[in-house]
């Protein structure tokens, strides 16, 4: 009984760490995207995490990043002795699984799998996009509350922290925006600018509209990916059954049954 | 023909359709299975419930299905069938020009069948372009830059071997180059659907029309920028359009960007059949207006009836040299036949 409780508790701890791993392209936690399929604990201190992406073809760049992110987060738990990460049903699944479980460094594995390329550039590019997307939400909310462009761009971090928002998206993104500001050292103290650019500069008031336009096109692209990935993840391996009331999407994936082994839809 | 609620007849050319065989019998390996599974996930994810198909029909549909879905139940007057071989994944290819042409011969007045080639085949690719011109008199081709070929996991439009092929297309009068630039997939470090190669190719081949299917999404900003610079770059709405049902506001944002940057004369309708069927797409598109606040951010652009008519058929007619009035007359002389069920 004690062991069962301990296992449950530890599983929850693992899930908690996993929520800190984001899909780099979408800037959403992999747990929110339902990419994590299974967490198992063996011998009290060994962890297996299985995950699956929305399609077999999802970019291996991101598959690598997420796999290594999972390893890093779970390994950080003090009681964990061994972590096994398994990416299921992916065109580069074998490469990713061998790489992430080899104990070697991420950059070594990645360079080996893509002609010596360095992934840091990709990571940096997507971190910048994530920043822009979070900033747009907060910036639009502040612009709606504060009158002039001048007041918006000169707002200080301390002031932003005190503001009250009501929209769901603003409430979700504000802490994530503040986290990234702190993590990157872009704004730390109360009198730092609340809306610096990713490069750390100020936004001139006369450029605010152009800045927002740019953030908007970044969001449109990310939203396309986000909507696609969410939808595809939810329908992957689901089939349609046409009954007397018309077609419905049935979920026959009890556990992880390979689609061809599952019963065929009726004709 | 789409009839508006006021009774006006709108000429529809479906710029991006397929006649594929993704059935298990044709799959060469796991990749073939995963490819059609991925298409099916697109279908189930973005279709209205009442438009869903069962898997076996989706994997392989009949010649009768195509005719009914596009022209009887659907509002299309004409459809452009694209070829995609995926020879590493499918025994007889995914959608070959031979199979599509055979299907189209039943109603040749309604179909334009495009070819495809892989520049990495070198001399053979050039020979194949000659073959497609002589055998099928193609007016266009579909390029799939992420296709696997041996060890290669993709290519770019401005590769030297691709330029040789485009020179030949230009010489033979194959003027419409449809390019798949859509959601990101492999290969590893290189993004095979990055749109920047379009910029080079479109500049260097001014005689050719570059129709970028899926508008480069999720690289819409890059695509818009290139399409603004190049007069011979067009955007195909396939994959963007189904969002009109699941996320209409988002679709409004995409349309506002396209109208503002690319313009009403350079956007083409495409259902991406059989991933989606044209009936519901065209009906919803005709009813659609860009939300006021989104339109205001982009200089008040709006989808007027006149603009919709261009997108649904007139723009594609220009690219393919179709005389719309003559075609309407021809088609009214050969009305859609209700196929025996």
Image (cartoon, coloured by chain):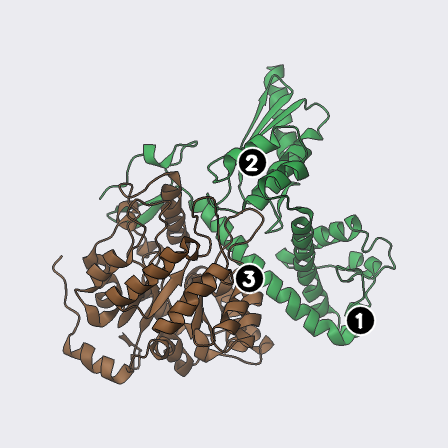
Residue at 38% x, 78% y is B315
Left or right, B9 with respect to A148, comes to: left
Q: Quadrant of residue A152?
A: bottom right
From the image, tell me which residue sits under label 3: B219
Residue at 55% x, 53% y is B191
From the image, tell me which residue sits under label 2: A96
Q: Chain under label 3?
A: B
Task: Classify the position of the N terminus of chain B by image quarter.
Answer: bottom left
Give how far across and how far down residue B289 sits, in percent. Answer: 46, 74
Give how far across and how far down residue B46 sits, in percent. Answer: 41, 56
Q: Quadrant of residue A223?
A: bottom right
Give the color of chain A as drawn.
Answer: green
Task: Classify the position of the C terminus of chain B by image quarter.
Answer: bottom left
**Labels 1 and 3 share a subunit:** no
Foreground mark, 1 or 2, reads 2
Q: Residue A151: which disc?
A: 1
Secondary structure category for the residue under label 1: helix
> For the residue carrying disc 2, how many other residues have a C-alpha within 10 Å: few (<14), some (14-19), or many (20+)?
many
- Upstream in sequence: badge 1 or badge 2: 2
Residue at 26% x, 73% y is B77
**Labels 1 and 2 share a subunit:** yes
**Labels 2 and 3 share a subunit:** no
Q: CA distance from mark 1 to mark 2?
A: 48 Å
Q: CA distance from mark 2 to mark 3?
A: 26 Å
Camera sees residue B214: no
Camera sees residue A232: yes
């Amino acid at each position: 009984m004690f062991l069962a409780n301990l296992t449950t508790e530890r599983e929850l701890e693992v899930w908690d760490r996993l929520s800190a791993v984001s899909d780099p392209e979408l800037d959403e936690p992999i747990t929110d995207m339902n990419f994590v399929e299974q967490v198992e604990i063996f011998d009290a201190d060994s962890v297996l995490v299985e995950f699956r992406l929305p399609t077999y073809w999802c970019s291996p760049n991101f598959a690598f990043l997420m796999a290594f992110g999972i390893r890093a987060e779970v390994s950080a738990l003090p009681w964990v002795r061994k972590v096994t990460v398994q990416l299921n049903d992916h065109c580069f699944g074998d490469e990713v699984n061998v790489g992430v479980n080899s104990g070697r460094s991420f950059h070594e594995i990645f360079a080996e799998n893509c002609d010596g390329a360095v992934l840091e550039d990709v990571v940096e590019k997507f971190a910048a996009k994530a920043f822009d997307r979070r900033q747009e939400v907060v910036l639009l909310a502040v612009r709606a509350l504060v009158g002039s462009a001048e007041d918006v761009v000169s707002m200080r971090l301390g002031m932003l922290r005190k503001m009250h928002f009501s929209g769901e998206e603003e409430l979700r993104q504000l802490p994530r925006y503040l986290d990234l500001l702190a993590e990157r050292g872009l704004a730390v103290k109360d009198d730092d600018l609340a809306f610096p650019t990713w490069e750390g500069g100020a936004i001139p008031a006369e450029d605010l509209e152009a800045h927002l336009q740019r953030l908007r096109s970044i969001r449109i692209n990310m939203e396309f990916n986000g909507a696609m990935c969410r939808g595809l993840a939810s329908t992957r391996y689901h089939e349609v059954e046409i009954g007397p009331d018309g077609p419905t999407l049935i979920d026959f994936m009890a556990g992880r049954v390979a689609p061809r082994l599952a019963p065929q839809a009726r004709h | 023909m789409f009839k508006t609620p006021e009774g006006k007849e709108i000429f529809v050319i479906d710029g991006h359709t397929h006649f594929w065989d993704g059935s298990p019998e044709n799959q060469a390996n796991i990749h073939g299975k995963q490819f059609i599974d991925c298409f099916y996930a697109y279908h189930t994810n973005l279709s209205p419930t009442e438009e869903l198909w069962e898997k076996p029909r989706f994997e392989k549909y009949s010649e009768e299905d195509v005719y009914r879905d596009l022209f009887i139940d659907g509002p299309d007057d004409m459809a452009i069938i694209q070829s995609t071989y995926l020879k590493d994944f499918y025994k007889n290819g995914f959608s070959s020009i031979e199979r599509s042409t055979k299907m189209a011969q039943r109603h040749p007045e309604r179909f334009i069948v495009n070819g495809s080639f892989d520049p990495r085949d070198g001399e053979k690719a050039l020979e194949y372009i000659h073959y497609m011109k002589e055998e099928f008199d193609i007016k266009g081709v579909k390029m799939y830059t992420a296709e696997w070929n041996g060890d290669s996991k993709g290519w770019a439009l401005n590769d030297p071997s691709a330029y040789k092929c485009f020179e030949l297309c230009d010489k033979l009068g194959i003027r419409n180059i449809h390019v798949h630039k859509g959601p990101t997939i492999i290969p590893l470090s290189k993004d095979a659907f990055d749109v920047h190669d379009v910029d080079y190719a479109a500049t260097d081949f001014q005689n050719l029309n570059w129709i970028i299917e899926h508008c480069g999404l999720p690289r819409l900003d890059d695509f818009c920028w290139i399409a603004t610079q190049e007069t011979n770059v067009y955007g195909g709405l396939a994959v963007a359009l189904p969002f009109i049902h699941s996320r209409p506001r988002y679709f409004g944002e995409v349309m506002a960007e396209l109208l503002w940057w690319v313009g009403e004369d350079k956007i083409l309708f495409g259902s991406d059949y059989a991933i989606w069927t044209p009936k519901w797409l065209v009906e919803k598109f005709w009813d659609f207006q860009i939300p006021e606040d989104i339109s205001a951010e982009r200089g008040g652009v709006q989808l007027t009836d006149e603009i919709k008519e261009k997108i649904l058929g007139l723009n594609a007619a220009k690219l393919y040299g179709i005389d719309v009035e003559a075609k309407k007359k021809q088609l009214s002389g050969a009305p859609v036949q209700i196929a025996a069920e």
